[in-house]
Image (cartoon, grey):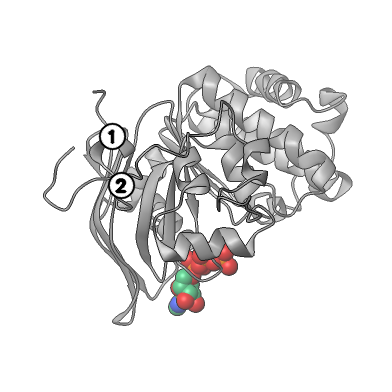
Amino acid sequence: MSAALLEVEGLSVAAEGRPLVGDLRFAVRSGERVGLIGESGSGKSVTALALMGLLPPGLRAGGSVRLAGRELLGAPEAELSRLRGAQVSMVFQEPMTALNPTMRIGPQVAEVLQVHGRVPDRRSAWQAAVAALADVGLPDPPALARAYPHQLSGGQRQRVVIAIALAGDPALLVCDEPTSALDVTVQGRVLELIRRGLAERGAGCLFISHDLAVVADVCERVLVMHAGRVVEAGPTRRVLTRPQHPYTRGLLAASDLGRTDEHGRLLTMDRFLAGPPPPLTEPAPPWQGTAEDGWATSGGGS
Ligand SMILES: Nc1ncnc2c1ncn2[C@@H]1O[C@H](COP(=O)(O)OP(=O)(O)OP(=O)(O)O)[C@@H](O)[C@H]1O
């Protein structure tokens, strides 16, 4: 089995002693897209920020987060800054928070390419920035590179953010609700862009979303978070069609995808999942998942 790209063991986050996230254990392999779902306030964003070393003041993380074998928790800020963008990048829900509103688009992309040593000088940085904007499907990239963020649509801004996040060819992309602020009409195209960017780089992805249809569309595996803990993990199809934990069942029932047939089998999810539905006779796996599901066991098994 290939070694995990991201290994999270016993991750906890607390705010002045109040636990927000506790004892998280999971792994993401290269090229794998893992969803993190759960209701608002369950701890998804705090988890993502802890992985990135970007927790706000007052929040403290404990445990272990290893990226390609390197421990990130407690690593010096200078080392984390080097890793961010080059090894791990993040795409947030609201692209305006990631972009500098007073700076034209082109220099923002060029700056990232230069910081990561992808280009030798400013001139080639500009050319590479225009190419990166073309690569994420933006129209008239040379003109767009001269625009300010407010002159772009929300979807175009998120494409720029994705171009920036992918500019350093990261091994891991952390996406926190990357399409939630976008029109439904552009969501699919932005998701396709993320999928393609990951596939071209063989990068892994932790994909946070409250939208189960989006997670079903993007992720091979899913972690279900409730009150700061992962309560269920496994292949997306299994978790979303045959949830084992009562919380996951509730989450599905509350979603648009929760409609069931006379056997209690979830119907609508099949529209979003590739391949045939699991047979009704198949025995249900244990809800806590197996090592094959990518569920890191508390005994430290792989
Ligand atoms: N800076 C902070 N200080 C104290 N508590 C915080 C801070 N940021 C988040 N929290 C708390 O941590 C918990 C988890 O929040 P988090 O934002 O991770 O949830 P979430 O699952 O991402 O929700 P949403 O889907 O609404 O973004 C919540 O109880 C929240 O109030």
Q: Quadrant of residue 155?
A: top right
Residue at horizontal 42 percent and vertical 60 percent from the top: 225
- Residue that extends furthest to the left in the rendered view of this protein: 299
Which label sits in the foreground, 2 or 1? Answer: 1
Q: Is residue 54 visible?
A: no
Residue 145: x %, y % from top left:
79, 31
Residue at horizontal 48 percent and vertical 30 percent from the top: 116
Q: SS at mark 2?
A: strand
Which residue is under mark 2?
26
Q: Foreground residue, 291 or 147? A: 291
Which residue is under mark 1?
292
Q: Quadrant of residue 18?
A: bottom left
Q: Quadrant of residue 226?
A: bottom left
Q: Is residue 224 above or below residue 199?
A: below
* 5 displayed left or right of 147: left
Q: Quarter holding the C terminus? A: top left
Residue 73: x %, y % from top left:
26, 54
Q: SS at mark 1?
A: helix
Q: Amino acid at mark 2?
A: Phe
Residue 6: x %, y % from top left:
32, 39
